[in-house]
Image (cartoon, grey):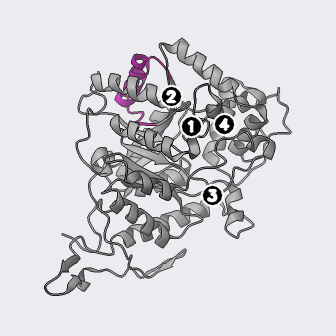
Amino acid sequence: MADQKKQLHLTAFMRPVSLHTGAWRYPGSYSDANFNFKHIVQFAQKLEAAKFDAFFMADHLAVLNMPLEALKRSHTVTSFEPFTLLSALSAVTDKIGLAATASTTYDLPYHVARRFASLDHLSNGRAAWNIVTTGNPESSKNFGFDEHMVHGDRYKRAREFYDVVTGLWDSFADDALTRDVESGEYFKPERLHVLNHEGEEFKVRGPLNIARPPQGWPVIVQAGQSEPGRQLAAETAEVVFCSPRDIQSAKELYADLKGRVEKAGRQRDGLKILPAALVIVGENKQDAQVKRLKLDSLVHYDSAIASLSIALGTDASGLDPDGPLPEDLPETNASKTSRESVEKLAQTEGLTVRQLAQRMGGQGGLAFLGSPSEIADEMEVWLREEASDGFTVTFPFLPQGLDEVTEKLIPELQRRGLFRQDYTGSTLREHFGLPRPENQFFKR
């Protein structure tokens, strides 16, 4: 058994509500689940009842760059803007964390600081910021740029972006707002810091016009696995959302990130590593595999080859469907981690372009399939062997897939002492066991 003092952390990846392209077509599923507020409220409340750490929303700043014949088959073409949705969910939930993506490439620090500070106040300390550098080159065209910012420059900008946002969150000391009715003093001027940041990327005066967030800073999440992404995580992140394909590559990533954290002068346990994992619960492994085969069969090839093109960062429609993936694909400015992962999968399993496209068109990453007991066995191994601190769970279809996780898998994990029976705190930092950061300008 795993060390009973160490338990899994589980977040739910909920935008889109299922990453699998065939999810909306699965028998009994809500075809509009990705854009139906009443359904999403039910999902969030079920996840909270199951004691999940957080409800996690990714974001896209452009319609996916694929041909319309493929795009017309995707349930991800429309989705709520994350802050609007999470602000609404904060009013119908009490404990579950609310994590959203905000781009450091096509947004500004002052906007991001205000939004997350507001969400943290609205939710009484449950907000998290997923720092992304935006890999989709189509996004640039929605913000007045003809060319997408190159990979290295995006991470350079992100690092300074983080410094500005966290500096703005610390504008007011925790005790700055006195609201003294008798004296007429609303706040102490000496407990207000004007940032006056001037860097290579940004010039921001401040202060932020919002009181310091309940958590001090919303929890910092980071999702890059490239070399600059790992270093950014080591210096800034408290939770890493990642996508290793197997336990060996996960252990290597885990050891690397934890080592970088320590070299950066931070506590090793101050970073939680939560790989994305598709979870399909069945009566047994064979039953779960049947569900996946049915799900994969609902992915149209037009969508599959378009998904492969996105993952590779280059048009794959002209490749020989029944031949191997070429080794001399042109260099692109898209996500390096995604491309390398796909190339490794093709090589390791000897997949043709068609087979690779079908895998990517569904959900090609890490998956746990089986009975609740079988899946719990695997998750326990990952935790015990330091391959992860938990998982970012993705669901095959909704509501059935989510219900099977919350009603069957979670009780099994709880029975083994691998997952909490109840929340022991009210903030997301407390769920993750993370300290509240001290104000950098007003030391205790």
Q: Secondary structure at mark 3?
A: loop
Q: Secondary structure at mark 1?
A: loop
Q: Nearer the viewer, mark 2 or mark 3?
A: 2
Residue 37 visible within the image: yes
Asked which quadrant contains residue 323, the reply is top right
Residue 89 drawn at (x, y percent): 42, 51
In the rendered structure, does residue 254 fall within the stretch colored magenta? no
- Per the image, the residue denoted by label 1 is 18
Upstream in the sequence, badge 4 or badge 3?
3
The numbered dot on residue 401 is 2
Binning the other alpha carbons within 10 Å of mark 3 as few (below 14), some (14 to 19) or many (20 upward) gives some
Upstream in the sequence, badge 4 or badge 1?
1
Binning the other alpha carbons within 10 Å of mark 1 as few (below 14), some (14 to 19) or many (20 upward) gives many
Residue 260 drawn at (x, y percent): 41, 50
In space, the residues marked 1 and 3 are separated at their CA atoms by 18 Å
Name the residue at the front extreme: 38
Amino acid at pointer 1: Ser
At 42% from the left and 62% from the top, the residue drawn is 116
Asked whether the residues under the numbered discs 1 and 3 touch, taking CB atoms below 8 Å apart as contact, a structural biologist would say no
Magenta highlight range: 369-392
User: Would you say 403 lies left or right of 317 here?
Assistant: left
In space, the residues marked 2 and 1 are separated at their CA atoms by 9 Å
- Per the image, the residue denoted by label 3 is 61
